[in-house]
Each structure stands twice: as C-alpha cells, then as structure tokens.
Amino acid sequence: MDSVSFLSVVKDYKAVFIDSYGVLKNHKGLIEGVQNSIDFIRKEEIALRVLTNDASRSQEQQAREFEKLGLRGIQEEEIITSGMLARQFLELKVKTGKVAYLGTKNSADYIIQNGMKQLPVSDVDLEELDEITAFAFLDDEGFDWRNDINKAVNFLRRKNLPVIVANSDKYYPTSKNDVAIAIGGLSRLIESILNQKFIRFGKPDSQMFMYAFEDLNRFGHYEKSDVLMVGDTLHTDILGGNKFGLKTLLVLSGNTRPNNVNLKISSTGIIPDFVSDSILY
Amino acid sequence: MDSVSFLSVVKDYKAVFIDSYGVLKNHKGLIEGVQNSIDFIRKEEIALRVLTNDASRSQEQQAREFEKLGLRGIQEEEIITSGMLARQFLELKVKTGKVAYLGTKNSADYIIQNGMKQLPVSDVDLEELDEITAFAFLDDEGFDWRNDINKAVNFLRRKNLPVIVANSDKYYPTSKNDVAIAIGGLSRLIESILNQKFIRFGKPDSQMFMYAFEDLNRFGHYEKSDVLMVGDTLHTDILGGNKFGLKTLLVLSGNTRPNNVNLKISSTGIIPDFVSDSILY
Amino acid sequence: MDSVSFLSVVKDYKAVFIDSYGVLKNHKGLIEGVQNSIDFIRKEEIALRVLTNDASRSQEQQAREFEKLGLRGIQEEEIITSGMLARQFLELKVKTGKVAYLGTKNSADYIIQNGMKQLPVSDVDLEELDEITAFAFLDDEGFDWRNDINKAVNFLRRKNLPVIVANSDKYYPTSKNDVAIAIGGLSRLIESILNQKFIRFGKPDSQMFMYAFEDLNRFGHYEKSDVLMVGDTLHTDILGGNKFGLKTLLVLSGNTRPNNVNLKISSTGIIPDFVSDSILY
Amino acid sequence: MDSVSFLSVVKDYKAVFIDSYGVLKNHKGLIEGVQNSIDFIRKEEIALRVLTNDASRSQEQQAREFEKLGLRGIQEEEIITSGMLARQFLELKVKTGKVAYLGTKNSADYIIQNGMKQLPVSDVDLEELDEITAFAFLDDEGFDWRNDINKAVNFLRRKNLPVIVANSDKYYPTSKNDVAIAIGGLSRLIESILNQKFIRFGKPDSQMFMYAFEDLNRFGHYEKSDVLMVGDTLHTDILGGNKFGLKTLLVLSGNTRPNNVNLKISSTGIIPDFVSDSILY
C-alpha cells in the first residue's frame, strides 16, 4: 500500500481514536513532532480519544505522564484504558468482596474500588477463600513471578470465580530491540495450565471501541463513519477498528516497520484503509 | 448451583435477551410451554430481544418461522442475527464491488446488499479477481464442499481482502444426538490452512450484545444492570453476556444438561448468575 | 544461509533420506535432472530411502509411479509412506473387527489388511457400531465431503475408539499456485469439533524416521550421524530430521523458495544444516 | 472400563515400561507396597525400564532417590529421562560452543556435556552472542523467573539457533492438591511470545519410547508386542505408548482418579488397553 499523509486524511473526520505507544510516544519518550499533529487536530475541532491497553496507570496518571513528556493538551477524560473496562466489569458483575490480583498496588488502586477490597495474591490464604469474589490480572510488576504465579494457579484450581485480564497484550516494548512479557502473556500461561479462558479487556476487542464511541456521543452526535482509528499494530488497533466498522490508519512509527508492512498485511489478512509513516505529516 | 425459577428472576428486569435455539425451540420444534413465558414477559412489560447466531435467514424469515412453529408475538424487529452484524460490516467497510461467498443464495440475499454484488465461490474466475472486494462465509449449505472449499482456499491465497464469518459457531444440533458442522467450523479449517484469522460475528463477541443494547435504547432508557441475558450455552450466551456486563441465566433445556452443568461451569470457569431448568417456570 | 552443492554434501554420508514431492517430482512431473543425482547416489553406494507423507498409494504403486514419470532405479522397498505406519499401528493395536474410514478404496486396500475389514463411512450404520474397532483418516478423495465428514463427526461422538490419521499434512500442492486440503487438514477440523486429538502418522513425527532408520539397519550398520535427510519443507522434513538427530539439507525446488528461505528459517526457528537450490548439483 | 489386576496382566509380557511419578512414588514419597510389585517383576524375569519426563536429575541421581525413599533394586541403567534425549540431541546436532539454559546447575551438569559449555541465561551478555550455539529449557528452578524469562525472550529474538525443551510437561504435582508450573509450561509461554515451536523431548513423543525400546534390545530380542507401558497420565504415558504400538495400562494411583477415569477416557479419546487401581495387585 502507498503511504499517505496523516494530516490530509484526518481532516475529513469528525473524530479520531489514537493508540498511545508507537504513535504518540515510544521507549525514548515523546515521538518528536506529535505536538504539531495534536495542535492540528484541535484547530480542526476534531474530537480525540486515546485508546491504550496499558492498564497499569489511571487516566489521570497517563495524562500527567503525557505532560511530563512534554505533550500538552491531552485531557484526562480523553484517555481510555483497558483497565477502565476491567473496573467497569467488576462494578457491574462482582460488586462486593475481596478481589485477589497479580499486579502493582497502583493498578489495584484504580481498578478495584467501590466496596470491593484488594487482596494481592501473596496475601491470599489458600485455606480461606470464602470472601474472595473475583481474580484480576492487572500488571506484570509488583509481585514475585515464581511464587505468585504458581500460587495463582493453585488458587484458581480450588475456587471457581470470575477471572479478568485488564490488559490482553502478550508483551510490550522496553527499548528499540527488547520487549517484556505483559500480564496478558502471563495470563495465557495460566489459562493453558488450567485449560480455561479468562475474560480479557482491551483492543482488539469491540468493547474498548464501544466504550470510546459511547463516550464520544455524550458530547455530540457521531456515526461510526465519522471516526478514524489510528495505531501502529495490526492485531490490536487495525483489526479492532476494522471489526467495529471504523476507517483505520496504520502508522509505521512503532510495531510495524516500513520494510515489512506489505508482507505483514498480506500474511495476516488485516488490511488498514490507510498507511502513513507517522502522524507527523 | 441451585436451579431457580426463570419467571421469578426475569420479573426484576426491564429487558431480557433470549437465545433462540435450546431456549425457545429445538430440533423437534417449539419447546412446549414457552408461549406462556413470552406472554408473561409481555404482561410484565419487559422488553425482549432474541439474539441468534443463525445467519442463514433474515429477521423477517426467523419471525415467520416462530409463527409457523406456533409461537405468537415475536416481532421481526426484536430478532437480532449475527448475519445483521456481517451486513453492517460490509456496508460500513466494503460498500462496493463483488462479495464472493460460501453459503446459500438466501443468506447472500439478506447479507450482501446495497450496491454490493453477490458472487458464489463456484462462479468465481480465479484469473479475474479485480472486482472482488470482500469474502464472506455465510452458511454451510448451498455449495459443493470439496470443490468450493478448496477453491475458496486458493482464492484467498491469491487475493488479500476483508474476510468475514457471519456465524462463528463451530457446529449446530440436527437431532437429539447429532450435529452438523457450521460455517464457523469450516471457516476455522480455512484459517488454519492459510494461517490467518478472519473477522467473526456473533455471540460471545461483545458486538452482538452492543447491537441489541443500542437497539433497545432507541425505545427507552436502559442500563446494563436492567438487562438479563438468557441462553443454553456457556461459551456463547453466558460468556458474552458476562463480559458485556449483563446478569446471565443459564437454562438446561438445550446444550447444557442437568447432569453435567456443575462440571461444565467449573471446568470452563464461565459462571452464570442464575441457572434454571428452562424458561417455563 | 549460503546455498551449497547437494552432490558435494551427500557424498560424505553412508545413507540419504529423501522427501518425494518438491525434491524428486512436482505438479508437472519429474524434476528435470534428478535421474543424474539418483545415479550419483547409486554409484557412490549411498543407501537411499524415500520418505513420503503421501498415504494414498502403496509402496509398489509409488515405485511404479516413479517409473512412469521416467525415474529409474527407485525400488519398492526403498519407499516409506506414512500409510505404512498407520497400517503397522492397526496391526499392533487393533488387529480385528471393522475399520471405518474416510478415503479412497485404494488407500484402504493397502492400509487396512490382515483380518481387519474395511468400512467406508458412507456404509456405516450409526445404530450398529458394535463391530467397528477403529476409525482411519486415509485420503481426501473417495467420499462426499459434506455427508461423510458430518457422519464421521456423529460416529465419533457416539463411539470411543482408536482414531488414526495416515497423513498429517494440512494440504498439498496441485499446481504452481494452487493447493488442495489434505486428509490431515480435514482431520484437524473434526478434532476441533470434538475437542480431541487423534493419532497422527508422518513427518515430522519421529516414528517415520525411526521406521526408515531401523529398516536401513537391517541391511548394514548405520549411526544417525551417517544419514542425511533431504527435503523441501521446514515443518516436516527438516524439523523431523533435526529432532531425530540427523543432519538436514533443505532444497529450494519445492515449498520453500529462494526469495524467502532466510525469513522462513528465522521466523520458524527451524534451521537446516545445509541449503541447496535442488538435488541437481 | 473395568479395573483389572496389574500383576495378572504384567506376567504375560517380557518387558514393562513404568512411569515414575504417580505409579512408583507421589508427593508423600514411595507409594506403599510397590516394592512387592517390583520384586514380582524381578521374580518373573520381566525386563523393566522407568520412563520419566523429570529432566532435573540424572539417571544416577534418580536411582539414588528411589533407594533413599526405600525402593530397592531399580538400577541406574534402567531409568530413562527426557533429559537424556535432550543430551543426545545436543551431542548429535550441536556438538560445540556454549549452550545457554534456564534451569538448575545440576540439570545443566548432566545434559550439557562433552565439549559444550554451560551458560546460565543470567550470565548471557546480549551483545555477545557469537559463541552460543543452542538454547535449552532444563528446569523450572535455579533462576529468577521475571528477569531470566524476559532475558530469554530477548535473547531468542536476536539469535536464531536450535532451542530444546528437556521436559515437555506443563506442570507437576507438589502436594495432594497443588501443582507447580514445569519448564515445559514456561517454554510454551515463550513459544507463544515468539510465535515459534521449540524441539520438545519426553513422553508422549515416540522418541522416548524408541530410546527405551532400543536400549531393551541391546540385552535380548523384544518385539513391541512383548512390552507393556504403565502410567498414570492419559496424555503422556498412554497416548505415547499407544502410538508407539505398545499395550498400555493406566493406573489410578496418580493423575487420573477412579471417579472420573471413564469421563476422561471418553472425552480425550485416549484409550488404554487395561485399567488398574495401582500396580500393587
């Protein structure tokens, strides 16, 4: 596919959904020049939402992080994380009791709220499971992998309860060449041991797009055809956007590289409507 | 889990989503006594939607089928099929050109419309693929399995385009003991040959529930907590309903049987909020 | 990897195992020039076995086929098919009764022998399963796909017995661009419907290599380090040969093409010891 | 299936292959009474091999462990571990250089020998990979899971080399109710991150049975029909024994329990020739 100008495409839409990592920022910090693109979007009065599978931090923390990196003008309310969907699930379907979790205290603080109590797996007493009402995979940090992953397996062999995964990504980049296994990857290991499927939140699932789309419509009237989804990953951003019925634009500033974009599109069968080098031009 | 009365549960909700096969009807026809339950739902002024992964027939055809079986009062507009989501995708993302398909002429008639032309795989000329803009798996009947499945494989090896599956079920019951492979099962075979993933519509995907929920809200104000999802299959009805944030009720009149319901719930980890023998009481 | 001369490599070995399709022949017939290479192998007194996942025809039929194509000097006894392993399994583990099968009469004739009776799925009476002692997937031809695949599913839902797959390949080439789904691919569809795993024969499984290696040692003394495995497919020939402990040589005259061989090796992690354009030089 | 007497079955065979964990010992130590059965096997002059997927310890260490538990008469040479197959692979296919590994020093000591150097992943310098010739998953202990699993992922993203798994089990029992994830389970997580398949050793793979069978034949003449395979796990012991062409006997003293043996046999389609409560009678 030929690469086109992001700015010339986005100006035809009333709203844009943007992935964070690989589009706005990367392992080195802000991608240079994105401030101009955000300013352009504001000037054109295009509504903006940032859709991220990073469940480790709250909307507010992610907004502050953008500011710290030097990107101005992303509002807390414009950021939608897969962790918010996990929180919504707990509020609708679990409501009370203790939620055992693997992750950081910080991730638990914003996802497990409103009458539910947090219980890190390390503090679970395997002989006293009565009050525990759900299990949540939140983040790949904040616990001892060997002890707590094995303990989670044995916990889940003993008690049948709702199990959710707040970030369905298998891994995330930590530098130009390196990655780290994400909590979504660890949750798949445990699914395979137990021969079960947990409830996963985040792109490419339609629910993430629905949440953003409904939120958008609280501030105006938007059809799906009014919205452009922008991301760097075929399997999450583009697949999810396509399935939800949005136009999709793949950028080559992150996961998908200019030298193999055509091979990846043809081998996966996931086809964006547009391809741009980045959101800079 | 203890079995409870469906009627005593449903009366606490403003709306109910009901699966068709295994709840309202089965291979022998209408499940005896469901007319009373539908009448009860009407009398209590509970809104109703029927959610079905049967993509072979249109809303209108499915409504007429209920009438023919002797069930009165299900309106065409209350029926939501996975085929309607497939049609919506084609209208939003494909729009023009020829859509090659595996299925019956009838399934193509209601899914491939509005400026798109239908092209059964048997009529595809593998040397002339330019005008074809999408591929659709619609139904397991209406074509020669050996010739047309192999032809579909070779078509998809040559041309990279959106591929959709209008019914994601692997198989469907044809009698008390027997099943037939559904188009969702055949599509998985072709995915495995090509090493690709197609876009699938139908429960348990959130999009089906979202479609029904949005449709409901065109006629009143409903929160997710106002809706009860009722179905006979853990992996589609209950998993999908749970994930979307609805309360779920499993009936034992179809796929899931009284003698192994507890084993199935604990081995899959998919937990309904309620279990009832059927919707009769 | 740099391409090397097959002839200069093979002369250092006491025996060579050669895949048939993609190395000796292709969809157009014999690969031009292979007679010279076979003559070279004979002149150097290197022992030869042909290892093929083609279970549709017997050793004798495959030998005659080589002759008909114009390749002289391949003995019937030098050909080892995955069907022979299936036959061996039936003789060791089943022994008596009727073996229901999907495939051609010809494939049944050489695989189901010695006191066992053949029963094509189309002739199975689903109410009379007592005498049936095994089920065999033999070939993708010789039956009505829709009727007989669905019938096989319902048969296997009713009776628990040994199920074998005589050719584990997913598909096979039918022309330069086209493929056809093999019985190994169809068997996977049925595994997925039943949620079971059948017993599969053929490369890359060690059993195929063991059979050839033991056969070789009936005529002399060979260590694993004396044998070179030659094939065109990473996932069957090279993976299987590597795991069995043989040196492996990938040819680029079949499935794996010169333009993407390095990409395929690095993305699969299956690494041949040598790469040659073909066996011609 | 009806349960039969192990002793009355085994006496009809010239050799017996016995799984270790769940048949001879369990988390509490030796299974009481197995000494009598081993003595019976000796008295009847039935050849014996112990086949175990425990790659953490050498033949010698496993023999001493049996002695320490109080079981007399199991010779070092009669024990066959999946680690021995891994060692054989390294000797045949790798031969020189450094082998990076995840596992204990002890497991490396007996698997990585003869001219190859051991290199724990924690000591790998990701900028200096030239001398490393293979990667081995040996044991789930002996390393920091979070650091070293992530480091292994990034190592394998940078360098394409043979990767082996010395124990293909997903998990192993640690008490009556509890399990721990085995190195085979961890290796699958990394396969899923990299989208590759590693080379796995151990039951149910035919290679394990072939190794034992060949070893047996160094001391006499045995046909496959002379050997009985005994184990507690359908997916490893029974599946592997069946496929290799041996008669198989499932014991109910380990993984498979009397209350669900029939359900497990019918749902997996893995059918032993005999079922016994244990090897005691």
Image: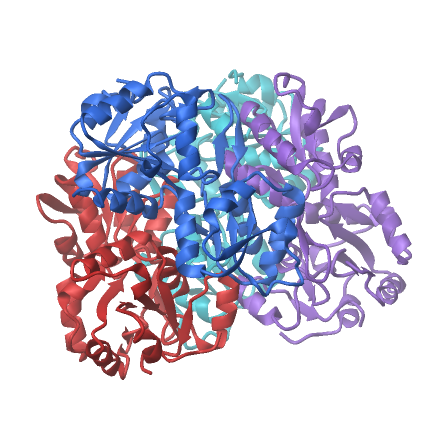
Chain colours: A cyan, B purple, C blue, D red
Residue A279 higher or lower than D77, as above or below: above
In the rendered view, does D87 fall on the left or right side of D170? left
Residue D163 higher or lower than B101, as above or below: below
Residue D247 visible at all? yes
Q: Nearer the viewer, residue C124 or C105?
A: C105
Where residue A50 sits, quadrant-wise, is top right
In the rendered view, does B66 fall on the left or right side of C153? right
Where residue C246 sits, quadrant-wise, is top left
The residue shown at (64%, 47%) is C148
Percent coordinates x, y for residue B99 in the rendering? 70, 27
Q: Nearer the viewer, residue B75 or D58?
A: D58
The residue shown at (42%, 73%) is D275
Percent coordinates x, y for residue C240 in the rendering? 32, 41
In the rendered view, does C170 fall on the left or right side of C122? left
Residue B205 visible at all? no
Percent coordinates x, y for residue C224 in the rendering? 20, 42
> Which residue is the extreme one toward the left?
D115
Q: Nearer the viewer, residue A46 or A153?
A: A153
Where residue B17 sits, quadrant-wise, is bottom right
For the C terminus of chain D, the quadrant is bottom left
Percent coordinates x, y for residue D8 in the rendering? 34, 79
